[in-house]
Amino acid sequence: MSSTDSTPIPDVGELLAPVLARVAREQRPLLLAIAERLAAKRYRGWAADPANAAHASALHACADREEEIARRIEALHADAAVLQDAILAANPDLEDVNRAIFAGRPLAQQFAIQARGERLGVATWRAFARTEEDATRRAALLACADLEEESARALEAVLAAEG
C-alpha cells in the first residue's frame, strides 16, 4: 500500500473551511453529520475492495462509527432531516469537494487523509462540546470525539501494518 507519489497530503480542514463558513454556526454539526455519512460510504467502498480484504473488518467498523456519529448529532436536532436538506441545497458542491480530496490519490494517501480527517473530527467535536451548556448535548459531542479517535487509531494501524 505504500506509495512513491510525492503529492502532498491536503489539509482537510483548509479544504472544508469555505463550506463550513457558508453554514450557520448552530447548523455546522449537522453539516459535519452529512460529512460523516459520506465518510461511512467511503469506508464501505474501501472495505469492499478485494485489495483491502485484510483490513475489511476494521474499515467496516470505521464506517459503523461514522454512521453512529451522524445518528448522535442528528438526534440532537428535532428537525435534522429538514435542516440537512437545506444545507445540501445551499451547498451543492459538498459532495464534489469531499470527493476531490481523495480523487486520483493512491490508497495509502487516501487512508492518511481520512486519518487526518478523523483527528480533525476529534478536535472539532471537542470544540463544540466546550461551548455547549447542556450536559446531555455536551456528552453526545464528546462521545462523537471518542468515536472519531477510534477510527483515527484504526486507520493509523492499517497504515502502519502496510508500512
Image (cartoon, helix red, strand yellow):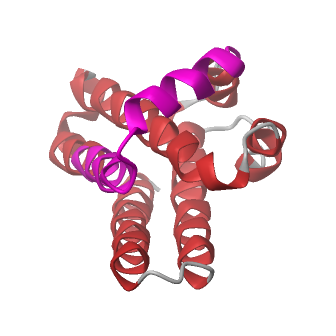
Residue 42 picture location, percent across and down? 40, 29
* 85 falls in the magenta region: yes
Q: Residue at x 41, y 39 (%)?
A: 80
Q: Residue furthest front?
A: 78
Q: How many marks?
A: 0
Nearest to the observer: residue 40 or residue 27? 27
From this view, report whether residue 26 is shown above or below residue 82.
below
Nearest to the observer: residue 137 or residue 15? 137
Q: Residue at x 23, y 23 (%)?
A: 48
Nearest to the observer: residue 86 or residue 51? 86
Residue 4 picture location, percent across and down? 68, 37
Horizontally, is 13 left or right of 54 in the view? right
Residue 158 picture location, percent across and down? 36, 55
The picture quadrant where one finds residue 19 is top right
* 73 falls in the magenta region: yes
Q: Main secondary structure of the magenta part?
A: helix
Q: Residue at x 62, y 49 (%)?
A: 28
Horizontally, is 107 left or right of 26 in the view? left
The picture quadrant where one finds residue 91 is top right
Q: Residue at x 30, y 52 (%)?
A: 75
From this view, report whether residue 163 is shown above or below residue 135.
above
From this view, report whether residue 66 is shown above or below residue 131.
above
Residue 99 picture location, percent across and down? 60, 22
Horizontally, is 10 left or right of 89 in the view? right
The picture quadrant where one finds residue 159 is bottom left
Magenta highlight range = 64-93
